[in-house]
Image (cartoon, rainbow, N blue to C red):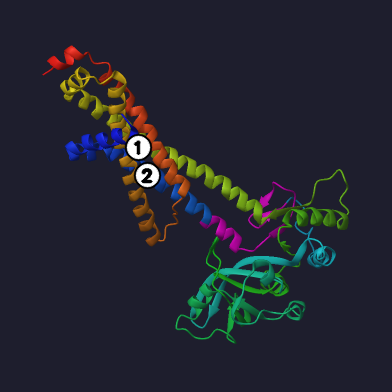
Amino acid sequence: MGVLELVKEALTATTRNKLRAILTMLGIIIGVGAVIAMIGIGEGSKRASVAIIRNMGSNMLTIFPGAPGTHTHHGPQAMGSAEILKEDDAALIQAELEDSSVHAATPQVQTTRPVIFQNATFITHVQGTGPEFQIIRAWELEAGRFFTEAEVKGQALVCVIGQTVKATLFPYGDDPLGQTIRVGSLPLQVVGLLERKGAGMWGDQDDLVVAPYTTVMRKVMGRNTIQRIMVSAHEGEAGLAEAEITALLRQHLKVPVSQENPFNIRKQDEMVQAMDRQAGILTALLAVAASISLVVGGIGISNIMLVSVTERTQEIGMRRAVGATRRTILWQFLAETVVLSVLGGLLGIVLALVAVAVLGRLQIPAVTEGWAILLGLGFSGLVGVVAGLLPALKAANLDVIEALRYE
């Protein structure tokens, strides 16, 4: 008996009792659908997280004071090292490494302050930085301009605001450009409006006010030292930039060879790689959890096929009596089980595609992975083979005389 004949006969046997066939396939349908959907959710979350990180700035590195492994709410920092980084270090890095690995560098400070305009008050993030901020963060302006290097040196009372700040302080659609807002008690004139950036690793990226770091550092925070340096490397040169910055700062700070770095450099691509690893583990766990439904479905199919063998004992005896071999009977029942399982897998794929589409409409990151579909379908076929083996062997080993006498 050829493969096509086996499949045709299996389909005929399956359609004899449509309701039972559907109920038998239900476990496989749910299992395959769950596996594909869970992988889709895991992959979708991974891509969304990586996109958020990349959206924070291409090839960005951040230099913190302090040895690796020591942290404060501003980043790594060791005892007595808070003033290790100076304002001029950013200019030194850019000047010395611009031709090799560094595209731009700027000092940075950050704090949280209430921002006030007329009767509206809003607590937001206030970042002090230089004009290079736009290059490093790859952030365009929707309107107005960015502050200049001269304004940074002059501690000018100017700022650029994000879309969330604009929507909160100017809820009636007023043009914020030229308006004066207060950061704490300090008046700042709004000279620019940033384009919408969306969510980031630490929340809403549009929820911020950006001003010259000299202004924020000295007039808002009341300090004379920077907190970190942001650097943008040339495309694909983040690793080289890290090595060159490390060598340059160690030389500039006169760090002995035997002493560890008094600063720590974090690369954006390291965060991407860490996110990839975490998302991969999460996706695998979701897939394993969902595959339990496939195992349960396989057990269900095996049970139903065992019942089917008992119900069709006389049919098996008659087929054997007219010349069917044990192998023919074995392949017949095995084919029925595999067809049932694969049909369930196909319906599970449809269920997964619908689920992913619905999740997309609900703004939940989920994607359809081709390899996940093939995995689900292959897994359903494998479950069919394993689940059908015992019923098929039972059918093939029935005694012909006893089968013909069975009622």
Q: Nearer the viewer, residue 341 or 158?
A: 341
- Give the mark, 2 or 1, whose residue is nearer the N terminus: 2
Circle on res. 34: 2
Quarter where residue 93 is shown: bottom right
- From the image, which quarter does the N terminus lie in? top left
Q: Residue at x 29, y 32 (%)?
A: 6
Q: Label 1 belongs to which residue?
A: 293
Front residue of 83/403: it is 403
Q: Residues within 10 Å of mark 1 (few under 14, many from 20)?
A: many
Q: For label 2, count other residues whose C-alpha is less than 10 Å away and answer few (under 14), some (14-19) or many (20+).
A: many
Q: Quadrant of the C terminus?
A: top left
Q: Nearer the viewer, residue 124 or 185?
A: 124
Segment colored magenta: 48-77
Do tag 2 and tag 1 residues touch (Cβ < 8 Å)?
yes
Residue 369 against residue 211 in the figure, above or below = above
Q: Is residue 106 left or right of residue 350?
A: right
User: Which numbered tag is attached to residue 393?
Assistant: none
The image position of residue 149, as x and y in percent, is: 75, 78
Determine if residue 272 is in view: yes
For this orientation, the residue located farthest to the left is 407
Amino acid type assigned to the residue bearing label 1 in the image: Ser
> Does 56 appear in magenta?
yes
Which SS class for mark 2? helix
Identify the residue at horizontal 63%, vertical 56% (top origin). 73
